[in-house]
Image (tube, coloured by chain):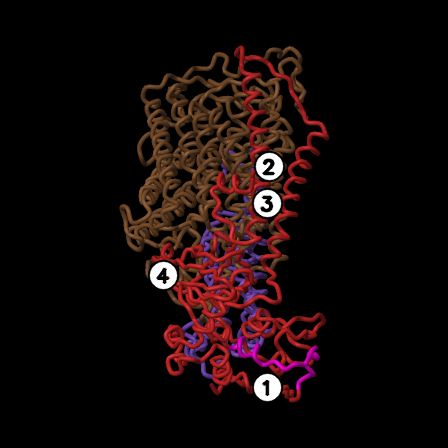
Amino acid sequence: MSPSPASIPPAPADAGAPLYLERNYLNARRGLWSWLTTLDHKRIGVMYLVLTSAALFLGGIFAMLLRIELLTPGPTIMSALAYNRTFTLHGVVMIFLFMIPAIPGIFGNFFLPLMIGARDVAFPRLNLLSVYLYLTGAAIALYGMIHGGADTGWTFYTPYSTTTVTMVWPILLGAFVLGMGSIVTGLNFIVTVHTLRAPGIGFMRMPLFVWALYATSIIQVLATPVLGITLLLVAVENVFGFGIFDPARGGDPVLFQHMFWFYSHPAVYIMILPAMGAITEVLSAFARKNTFGYRAVAFSSLGIAFVGFFTWGHHLFTSGQSTVDAGIFGVLSMFVGIFTAIKIFNWTATLYRGSIAIRTPFIYVIAFLFFLLFGGMTGIALATVALDVHWQDTYFVVAHFHFIMVGGTVAGFLAALTYWWPKMFGKSYSERWGIVGATLIFLGFNFTFIPQFLLGNEGMPRRYYSYPVRFWPLNVASTAGASVLALGFLVVLATLLLSLKYGKPAGPNPWGSRGYEWKTLSPPPEGNFLTQPTYPRMPHDYDDLNPGRGGH
Amino acid sequence: MNELMRRMLFLPEQGSAYARQVDRLHYFVISMTMVGFVGVAATVLWFVIRYRRRAEGEPTPTIEPRPIHEVLFVGGPLALFLVWFAIGYPLYVRLQTPPRDAMDVYVMGKKWMWKFAYPGGPNDMDDLHVPAGRPVRLLITSRDVIHSFYMPAFRLKQDAVPGRYAETWFQADKPGRYEIFCAEYCGLGHSAMLGTLVVMEPEKFDAWMTEARRSPAVAAAQDTPDAAANPVATLARQGRNLAVEYGCMKCHSVDGTRHIGPSWLDLYLRKEPLEGGGTVVADEGYLTESMMDPGAKVVKGFAPVMPTFQGRIPGPEVAAIVEFIKTLRTDAVHPAPTPGRAYEPVPGFDPTRSR
Amino acid sequence: MPAAESHVAHHFPDLEVQSHAARLGMWLFLATEVLLFGGLFTAYALYRMLYPSAFHGASRLIETSMGALNTVVLITSSLTVALAFHYSRQSRNRLAALLLVATIGLGFVFLGVKAVEYAHHFREGHLPGRFYRYAGLQVPGASMFFTVYFLMTGLHGIHVIIGMGVLTWLAVGAWRGSYGGDYTTPIELGGMYWHLVDLIWIFLFPLLYLI
């Protein structure tokens, strides 16, 4: 495994490579039809990028509408029904159309094969099918939004969701189809990791992003079917009245909550694990440092995937479950926190004696660390059960999961996007505007959600259309922060889009990264590599004075 | 100190000793969180400045963790988290176990109001009257969708689930008025489903209760047909009528006679041995459970022949029947466990069918 | 073996790895199917616990002999599909195709029996939730039994129909000689799916008909 001492210092991977590969995966075939029928994992990744970004934009608009409505204690710009529909749509769009598919769909598809030296994922046709499942699911859900406008919240709690007058089944069906797409992606990744690793890449040499995706895929495959059947049962109940969750017909509404959270709690890890994996890559690249505790980081992903299945009951502390159940679920929730803590400590230790460059992606890494740390600690605080009784269903919980979801997943998404953008499109974006956007997002995010923690302490329940006047000042602060956050997103969007037209060619490896995915040209050729790369050293091994020491 | 932290964290006033205890845990947890947060954040920032890149392409040493690192990374947070849990969980258990001498109030959520019923007393809407300094147990259910009974000043919340009763309790320090919210999303009027807790001096409360029992105006707020016909009908009296109507009396006696099911006389708070071992105290929770899920805990010596009434008896009526059972008390100090049943049940005979 | 190599996609090094990938993918897919039914089994377990006597009474209303007949039919069909795979590996493609057709035929028999049962339930009013109108058993939980019964057998029926579609496609391919010898992965995977459908029924039959 050790390379010969003659390779000190090693020739950069990009020696003699063109700055911009003229004939690449983007233009090797032309026309809309070539995109719609493509089996190339990179093009599928780009299609996911377009689709999920559109979903993020749509969900963001809903979020802004909600914040504007909450600017005053009474009605501001919409009716109570419109408000209830808007927060439902915000949740459904953000979770099912953005959070779950985004990082695996975009960066998993694009980079997983590149990182393990494969030419494609194991089942390219299934991969394309997952895009169409996503489109179909999104179309059904959008039809439901325009036509029925479900007002149940994204959690679809029975018996409200089975008795409401609004039309719920299209959104449920849409989420079911989206879930099928998610299963297909997960299945594809697992098989790819098992069968298509290039010679030299053993399991203990895979980039940590691949480990995170692998753990995510296990959750996707095992948890999503349960959500599927649960949503179908609610839809059947809503349309036909079979009574399965209806107390008036002998059904048990809390059974729904158990089945729903059996999926939806692990789903939180479907959303955050890929972001953790991406952050690991970006952090190592900009610290020029091997990841501290490779095994610990890799196995903690699996640990989260495993323990994540046994914590769902912490959503039901106030639903009347027994105190014994509450105790068990509380302790198990602490263990998930441990795995996250391991990651945070290892990331911090990775910085030690590194060579740290503060570039746009790295700012997102720092932001991610802060958000995850605070979001995670408040999560543990929620698992202490007694405090949860006060916080359950208040803005404290809203702020907590937005710290994990927006602060964690979206920051991870943006770190990944700005880090891999030059590889995906071969162009550099404006570093100055990149930093401006990242800073705006960091500040805006804090101003939006820290007041919401305090609102929760003060006792404001979530999903409130109007509220007592004492909650007013903090709501105004939160809405002001949200505007800054929205501005930050627009700056990022503009910076990246303009780079496509005006950006300079980035070169094969603008960051000097030693991640495996940088061993090809920018943008990559259609078959991923012109010549199959070799993998003599661990990913992110920057120890040129003692090469191969990290070679396990 | 308490007051300073409370204001810094925007917590509402503390209406009970329990609220103060929860807040102490809150301060502890939030301080530890901030210490941990500042510690890690400062380390990150220090590393970022100390090890900033000085030249492109610098080599860096490969550093691998030693076992002590792993132990610290796992053990440190685990110990901290378990301490939090060890403080928080007993508090939760305390909230779930009301004291024996607590006064009962039945709480029912419905779109979009709270209804409160006092055993042997009046019904009331939106305003919950309780005496200061006495423990009050709330038996919470819902009539339609799931609601959640939330009193921020008491750090107390319990979901109101249709078809089952949940209990929680509190003891207010001093007279005053406090907010009641619905915390589980329930539709258009969710944020308008507000109530007020009115804590009164105990003597004033007793006077209010006496007055309310007498006053037809308050009793008329009851919306059951029985109440309309007979404005002074108490919950227990309603329960008696309902028990006859639902056919309970076909198997249960009220005078201690042995029959197909255990007698209701002195049943309340009796310790009953169970079929398959163990015992149960026949409190409100067990009585409700036995109506909803009769097979779950069968008293020793009886056959599991009782049909479930899940979905057949609305929440308030369950409350009424339980209240009726509670009135059936003699002065026996230690009610003996129920002797076994007197008759073999007739196969295929469903005592509730004739209703 | 040029015939076999033509089946290898460009991103796989050889046929063996590709078949391994396909098999692994199928096992994962079957795991998702098990979990899909898992939700319904959970609901069954909970309501059986809540309404033991109603479930006992209601399960007397469905004809055990019909269920037993269908069990035999499905187990036989599992045998025929396994034989189809066996002969396909010996490149006896026509025989394999005929066995697949026999499997599909047994699938039709299964659905036919199920249709007779359903028709009986519709006539008698053994229906889920608010549609339940059978006067002979009016206890709470009886309608819940039929809710669970129709959801479980309905979802299983949908799987049978999908399986028959897959087998039809395989039968056509086998008749044309698209598979055989070293390349029998599609028939193997289709057979695995059919076995799963069979296996789920083997769990449904005792839970719904016998106990």
Image coordinates of residue A23 in percent, x first then y, are: 39, 22
Disc ID at residue A164:
4
Q: Which amino acid does label 3 sit on?
A: Leu
Q: Looking at the image, is mark 4 or mark 1 nearer the viewer?
A: 1
Q: Sort mark 3 into few (<14), some (14-19) or many (20+) by Cα contacts within 10 Å.
A: many
Residue A348 position (above or below residue B78) = above
Q: In which quarter of the image is the N terminus of chain A?
A: top right
Residue B350 vertical position relative to residue A350 in the rendered view, above or below? below
Magenta residues span B321-341
- Label 3–label 4 contact, CB within 8 A: no
Chain seen in purple = C
Viewer-nearest residue: B353 or B115: B115
Q: Which chain is brown in the picture?
A: A
Task: State whether discs 3 and 2 lie on one chain.
Answer: yes
Residue A150 on image: x %, y %: 35, 54
Q: Under tag 4, what secondary structure?
A: loop
Q: Mark 4 lies on which chain?
A: A
Please indicate whether residue C188 sits to the left or right of residue B126 in the image.
Answer: right
Give the labeled residue for mark 1. B253
